[in-house]
Amino acid sequence: MFPALETELKQQTLPDPYEDFMYHHLQYYGYFKAERGSLPNSATHQHVWKNNHRYLLSGSFGETADLIPDPLQKEKRLWPTCLSSAVHRQIEAENRDSLMLNSPLLKSRQLLHDDLGEVNSRLREPRDLFAFFSSSGPLQAPRWPIECEVIKENIHHIEWVPPQPEYFYQPTGNEKVPEIVGEEKGTVVYQLDSVPSEDSYFTSSRVGGKRGIIKELAVTLQGPEDNTLLFESRFESGNLQKAVRVNTYEYELTLRTDLYTNKHTQWFYFRVQNTRKDVTYRFTIVNLLKPKSLYTIGMKPLMYSQLDASTHSIGWRREGDEIRYYRNNTEDGQQPFYCLTWTIQFPHDQDTCFFAHFYPYTYTDLQCFLLSVANSPVQSQFCKLRTLCRSLAGNTVYLLTITNPARTPQEAAAKKAVVLTARVHPGESNGSWIMKGFLDFILSNSPDAQLLRDIFIFKVVPMLNPDGVIVGNYRCSLAGRDLNRHYKTILKESFPCIWHTRNMIKRLLEEREVLLYCDFHGHSRKNNIFLYGCNNNDRKFWLHERVFPLMLSKNAPDKFSFHSCNFKVQKCKEGTGRVVMWRMGILNSYTMESTFGGSTLGNKRDTHFTPEDLKSLGYHVCDTLLDFCDPDRTKFMQCLAELKELLQQEIHKKFKELGQDMDLEGSWSDISLSDIESSTSGSDSSLSDGLPVHLLNTADEEGAGFASTLQKQPAFFKNSENTSSSMMKNEKPRLNELNGRDKGTSLGPSKMTTLILTKNKERMQREKPGFTVSCSPKRNTNPSQEPAPDTKPNWSRNRYPATKGGRTTAVVYPSLHIYTYP
């Protein structure tokens, strides 16, 4: 077939390293029994590849290396906003030259090409062998459901800190309540086609979404005098289904529900073009579902001007006047709708502007950040990026393991773990900004960050629901369900992100203690930042779960509200990450709720939060971790004493409301903490509980037995729940006993590995070796490394009394001694 090739094969004498390796590998495992001489030498193919450009290999990064017959069908790998020009050239060359190999002889997929098209005879990285994060090639572009149309434009916003505080809107009481006209009397100027509804379910995905030519959904302007706004939302995280022009400068907007559902309209993010300056526009969103909203108490929408960004470096800012949130006068017969209306004046003519419910943080934003970490020669030494799993659409769910290399295996084994996750609810982008602040600090060269990496292993899943983030959902995944109600699931294929997260934590608990679990969320009805935890009535650790939130409130007094925290475990929240991890044995298991609005505390009272405010909270989480684990237990015991006093006051208040007078000293054991606290309900997320939509028909056909089997809990949950419930039945401590046992239950530095109450008796008997931190108090002296200091509590900042100078420099190892990757 190729005479020249056959001549070269006969003349070839040097063995190819890759061929030699594969020959021995396959022969060892019994997969190859042919004679070695029957194999072509892959090194010989280089001449053919270099001189036959139709035999070029398709570059594939992180996916199956299928050869692609048509270069027009080649899936692009990444929005180009965060890639170098060299990578751009590589992608373009692959898309242009990728063709199918016709010859069965040329089957090597290990030959790589440089930017000039020359063959580079180095081995390609193994794909999905250890799920390593590769910094040598482009990241995977977002994958969309095949029903979704996606525009080709790349949306990018600059980060910007407003020079002045952005205060809440002050209602006057005279705000207009527009009558909803609808498309019968108005003109539809934008409408999405074929939006997946509750009657359908997710089937497949591809980069770029729907195949074919992307339609222009906005109206066609009739000339330069036509002042109709041009709407668009078919980009990453965008959400707007329909726009109806009801007056010259007035528009009614309809949000898209979460895909494959008919619920959850809260998040919006869309673009408008063809603006006019010095004209008052009115926008009214007509199909919101929540009866209460922060817009009723002063929250403003966000606006972004592209001209301001390019000419003045001004980013997202709070804008809007005559803001009103009210009940719609039309209903669909099932549930009432609510409206949000506001007026706006655009800063420029012919500008491109964006509106959003909160500061967007997309999947591509995350990937660009992770790429910078992977390419950093310093950060990549102590931050290992892995693929936790693939989502339903095939998007990568990333796992970061952050810790300094230990000097000995014993020191590595003694490290506790901290698990942090975010964006299980895709429309709560504030969780990503807190996560961004945490990662910025923990990956810095700050002395405090170095100390934290010395004593902890951080497991971080920065985006649990990438599919929902990409398509612009508010609460659900592509299964049409709220993932934060399914942490008990056994449906690995339907809920892969949380199934793998739970499994990773379960395996982590088997090898070390997990000091803290925290899932970052957003809250649409309350201001400030606060935590939801889980009451623990065990005498030994009573009230301990409240110490970390109280410390955090002292470190961030103008952002974090301890009084808004709640520790009640409700039955409807049993499937949440917070409760499931608590039942698995993590005492300090929390949901962090950050408002979409702003603060009502301290110096930031009545002002909106910016991304910098939320990122600073990520730093305060690190700061509080050091306070919480300080071998000097003074601050810990001080917080416990304060918690007991607060609890007494709350109990007195409750009995006073009931008109009763009770002697707490004599009846403390009859009072349950859960009875004192109010419910944390108010979320409609439970409406998205149950089987994924694609299994509902199967469940109906098979009957209740099938459904009960799918909802069956894994065995380890039953064991942990039995243990937890038996703990709950323990005698509650009396108030007059607490003062006598405080000192005896304090944990000194030699017992840092026994902070967690373990539910597994075998683990309690297998206590890890003690690890005393011999480090000095590390305070960041570089003001650029941390936010401006807030008002601090009146406690000593001396964390570690030993001197840092007496500690020998830790040896830098190429990797960790103890691997905990899933």
Image (cartoon, rainbow, N blue to C red):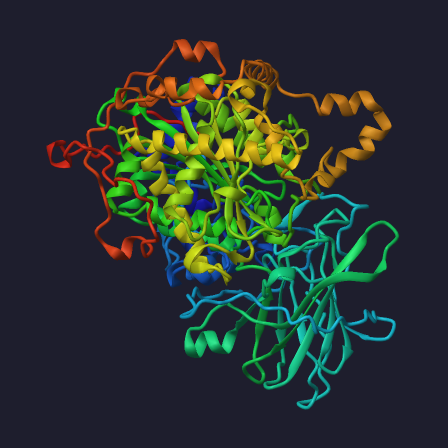
Q: Closer to the camera, 364 or 100?
A: 364
Counting from the top left corner in percent of width and height, residue 744 is at: 34, 17
Q: Residue furthest left?
A: 806
In this picture, residue 62 sits left or right of residue 354: left
Residue 687 location, quadrant = top right
Counting from the top left corner in percent of width and height, residue 542 is at: 47, 23
Counting from the top left corner in percent of width and height, residue 690 is at: 73, 33
- The answer, for residue 34, to whether it is visible in the render is no
Q: Closer to the camera, 453 or 59?
A: 453
- The answer, for residue 709, to whether it is visible in the render is yes
Instruction: Report the residue at 30% width, 43% height from top.
Output: 794
Up-down relation of residue 687 to residue 26 (above or below): below
Instruction: Report the residue at 64% width, 30% height from top.
Output: 660
Instruction: Report the residue at 11% width, 32% height from top.
Output: 806
In this picture, residue 276 sits left or right of residue 360: right
Q: Closer to the camera, 667 or 618?
A: 667
Up-down relation of residue 428 to residue 668 (above or below): below
In this picture, residue 321 sits left or right of residue 598: right
Counting from the top left corner in percent of width and height, residue 377 is at: 27, 47
Up-down relation of residue 552 to residue 537 (above or below): below
